[in-house]
Image: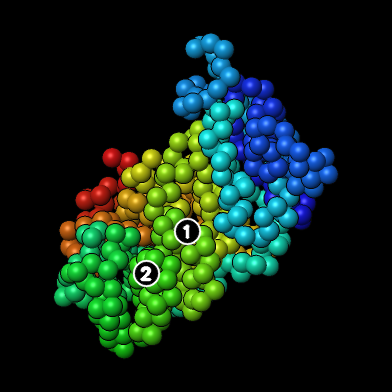
């Protein structure tokens, strides 16, 4: 199995599922729509993708994808199943872009398929030999933050499009003095005229250094360096040379090749934002499941990866989020321990539920509005989050703790215990 990539798909088809799976395997390896003289038996033996197994499922209840063929009646329902297909590694080699061309290329357009979703990938060790994966991961991030144990608490600069430099300085100073572990740019803030990238790096770095001289501890700040590939290294170097301790990229926007290029050069943890992931994951009949996506992102080098959060404001259920977090927690080849990042609608009231469901503190919890929207200001928001997580780990009741802790009480009065509203 070290000579093949095994891709798992959920497919629907008006053809028998095995026949549809064979059409997928053929399209994505040796075949075309007509027999060719050069497509010899020997060539197919060496290069053809093979259907390993088919697991039949009950028919779905959603309409087929546009253009699905082979239906004989408007009332037909396609067959449905999970299939595993083996792609010879020597077809594309240990290359993430070329891997995706094989396992997630033209197959989404095949008429034989009424639905198709890449669920998971089993990758041979040749990929680990080429791609070193995360450089810092959980333990390296904890060391840089100076937080050896406990949940890691962070926030995002809000409002989303960012602040003018004088306001940004004040917010960063307040958050750092409140002993927050992590701050990041919003993914919408890159190099805007009101806070140019270089000036933003200089201002934030100066404030964090000033606070560290006072407290002895420096909060990690992930600057958004997302840009054209030829700018990634220069942006990283500007942060590193300014004493920065992390960079952030939007994985889907720079691509896996861009991420791997940055990882080969980076001296800092890479915070991986998953912006645009819903394009691939939201429709259950189409796209790439987060379980497969996270493996590729970790291989390419992210030290932190957004997974969405419990009680989030987006479409994913708590079970979906748990599955995503557990996937990130699974080691690849005995290592690659990327830090799961929980965000979207995170507030102190969610801490007990999150800890009960996940049972770990190897998490980075990002609260944007849940900290900045605290009625007594961001510092009180940090204290409320810290107290809520302390209660969750101890098994204490939040409402009882809030009697003695004003910031937590005000947070629960303002945000409640989290919701999907």
Tell me what residue is drawn at x 41 percent, y 45 percent: 278
Which residue is tagged 1? 255
Quarter of the picture holding the C terminus: top left
Q: Residue 314 occupies which quadrant of the picture?
A: top left
Above or below, 49 relative to 163: above
Which percent across, then down, holds residue 221? 35, 73
Q: Is residue 368 visible?
A: yes
Left or right placement of residue 63 versus residue 197 in this view: right
Mark 2, secondary structure of its residue: loop
Which residue is tagged 2? 225
Q: Nearer the viewer, residue 361 or 368?
A: 368
Nearer the observer: mark 1 or 2; the answer is 1
Of the numbered discs in the image, which one, if any, rests on residue 227? none
Tell me what residue is drawn at x 79 percent, y 45 percent: 43
Which percent across, then down, holds residue 132? 61, 69
Above or below, 23 relative to 183: above
Mark 1, secondary structure of its residue: helix
Question: In the current view of this chain or complex, which residue is farthest to the front?
Answer: 37
Q: Residue 130 occupies which quadrant of the picture?
A: bottom right
Tell me what residue is drawn at x 58 percent, y 38 percent: 107
Tell me what residue is drawn at x 59 percent, y 31 percent: 11
- Mark 1, Cα crowd under 10 Å, few <14 / some 14-19 / many 20+, is some
Q: Nearer the viewer, residue 256 or 139?
A: 256
């Amino acid at each position: 199995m070290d000579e093949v990539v095994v891709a798992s798909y959920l497919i629907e088809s008006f053809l028998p599922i095995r026949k549809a799976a064979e059409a997928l395997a053929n399209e994505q390896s040796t075949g075309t729509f007509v027999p060719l003289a050069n497509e010899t038996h020997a060539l197919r033996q060496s290069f053809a993708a093979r259907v390993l197994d088919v697991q039949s499922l009950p028919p779905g209840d959603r309409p087929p994808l546009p253009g699905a063929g082979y239906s004989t009646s408007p009332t037909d329902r396609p067959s449905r199943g999970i299939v595993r297909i083996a792609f010879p590694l020597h077809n594309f080699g240990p290359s993430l872009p070329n891997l995706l061309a094989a396992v997630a290329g033209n197959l989404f357009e095949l008429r034989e398929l009424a639905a198709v979703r890449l669920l998971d990938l089993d990758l041979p060790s040749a990929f680990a030999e080429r791609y070193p994966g995360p450089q810092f991961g959980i333990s390296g991030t904890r060391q840089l933050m100076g937080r050896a144990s406990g949940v890691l608490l962070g926030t995002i600069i809000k409002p989303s499009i960012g602040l003018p430099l004088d306001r940004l300085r004040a917010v960063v100073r307040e958050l750092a003095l409140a002993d927050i572990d992590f701050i990041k740019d919003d993914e919408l803030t890159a190099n805007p005229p009101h806070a140019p990238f270089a000036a933003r790096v200089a201002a934030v770095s100066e404030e964090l250094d000033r606070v560290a001289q006072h407290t002895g501890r420096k909060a990690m700040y992930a600057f958004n360096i997302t840009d054209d590939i030829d700018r990634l290294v220069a942006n990283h170097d500007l942060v590193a040379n300014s004493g920065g301790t992390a960079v952030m990229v939007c994985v889907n926007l720079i691509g896996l090749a861009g991420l791997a290029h940055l990882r080969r050069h980076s001296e800092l943890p890479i915070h991986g934002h998953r912006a645009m992931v819903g394009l691939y994951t939201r429709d259950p009949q189409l796209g790439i499941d987060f379980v497969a996506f996270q493996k590729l992102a970790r291989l390419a080098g992210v030290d932190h990866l957004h997974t969405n959060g419990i009680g989030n404001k987006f479409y994913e259920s708590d079970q979906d989020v748990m599955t995503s977090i557990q996937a990130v927690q699974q080691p690849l080849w005995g290592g690659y321990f990327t830090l799961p990042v929980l965000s979207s609608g995170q507030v102190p009231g969610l801490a007990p539920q999150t800890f009960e469901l996940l049972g770990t503190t190897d998490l980075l919890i990002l609260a944007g509005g849940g900290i900045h929207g605290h009625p007594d200001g961001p510092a009180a928001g940090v204290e409320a989050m810290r107290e809520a997580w302390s209660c969750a780990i101890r098994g204490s009741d939040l409402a009882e703790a809030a009697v003695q802790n004003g910031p937590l009480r005000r947070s629960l009065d303002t945000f409640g215990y989290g919701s999907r509203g």
